[in-house]
Image: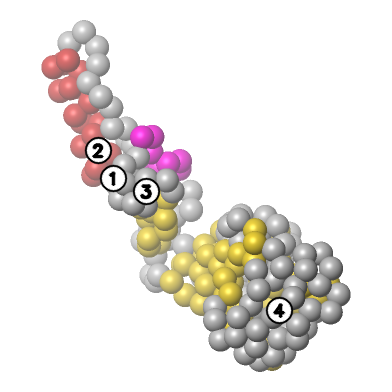
Amino acid sequence: MAQNWPTVSGTSALNAAVKTDLPDRSESLRTVFSGASAPLNPAAYQLWADTTTKMLRQRNAANSAWVDVLPLLGNGGSMSLHLAPGALAAGTLSFPALPVAATIRRIILVSGTTTSGSVAATTEWTFMLRNLTAANVALFSATPSTATNQSGIGGGEMTANTAYVLNANQNVSANALDVLQLVVTKVGSPTVVASYTVVLDFFERGV
C-alpha cells in the first residue's frame, strides 16, 4: 500500500500531480500510511498503521517518535497481569501465560517501603524481564537497578507507594501463551523492600 506524500516534480507538473502524486497521497490517507516501516517525512500527530507490530501508531507532538495507540483489528487494548510476591527477594517471578498475542510495554513495581543509599554495582536491586518461551530473550537492553538511571528502561531509587516503571525497549512482541519472567538480583545489602506488587502492562497485538 502507498505510504508516500510526494511533492510534485518533473517537466509536466500537472501530469505528475494528476497521474501519480495526488493518487498516492489519497491512497496513503485511505490506508492510514499502512506499511512495515515508518512513513518518510512524518508530521506531528500523523497516524501510521504499522503492519510489523500490528499496532496503530501516532507521531508525538514533538514529531520525534511514534507512540502506540491501539492494536490493528484486535479485540482489546491495554491489558495487565499482576503478581504480589510480598517482600522483595532475589530470584525469579514468572507471570501467567499471556492470554493473547501482545506488545509488552512495561513492568510497574510498587513497594510499601523506600530504598535509600543504593550504589551502582555494589549495593542495589537489579531487574531483568525475559520471555522464557521465546528463547529466553531479554526485553530490557540493559539491567535496570535502583542505583542508576538508564535511558529507556527506568532506574533510580524506589519510593514507597509510588510506581517504579521499567519500560521494555526490545523484543517487545510476544505470542499468546508466552511466559514472561522477572529476574530479581540482589547486589550487596540494599534496603529491604516490603510488600511489593508487580504489574506487567501490555497491548493486545492486532491482526
| Percent coordinates x, y for residue 157 in the rendering | 65, 73
Residue at label 1? Answer: 31
Residue at label 4? Answer: 116
Task: Please give the name of the residue rendered at 69% of the width and 71% of the height, measured from the top-left corner.
Answer: 146
Q: CA distance from mark 1 to mark 2?
A: 6 Å
Marks 1,2: beta carbons within 8 A: yes
Amino acid on which disc 3 is placed: Ala
Q: Which mark is residue 62?
A: 3
Magenta-drawn segment: 34-41
Residue closest to the far top: 11
Q: CA distance from mark 2 to mark 4?
A: 56 Å
Task: Please give the name of the residue rendered at 17% of the width and 15% of the height, measured from the top-left corner.
Answer: 13
Amino acid on which disc 1 is placed: Thr
- Badge 2 crowding class, 10 Å Cα cut-off, few under 14, some 14 to 19, many 20 or more, is some
Q: CA distance from mark 4 to mark 3?
A: 35 Å
Q: Which mark is residue 27?
A: 2
In the image, 193 versus 10, the foreground residue is 193
- Badge 3 crowding class, 10 Å Cα cut-off, few under 14, some 14 to 19, many 20 or more, is few
Answer with left or right where residue 90 lies relative to residue 174.
right
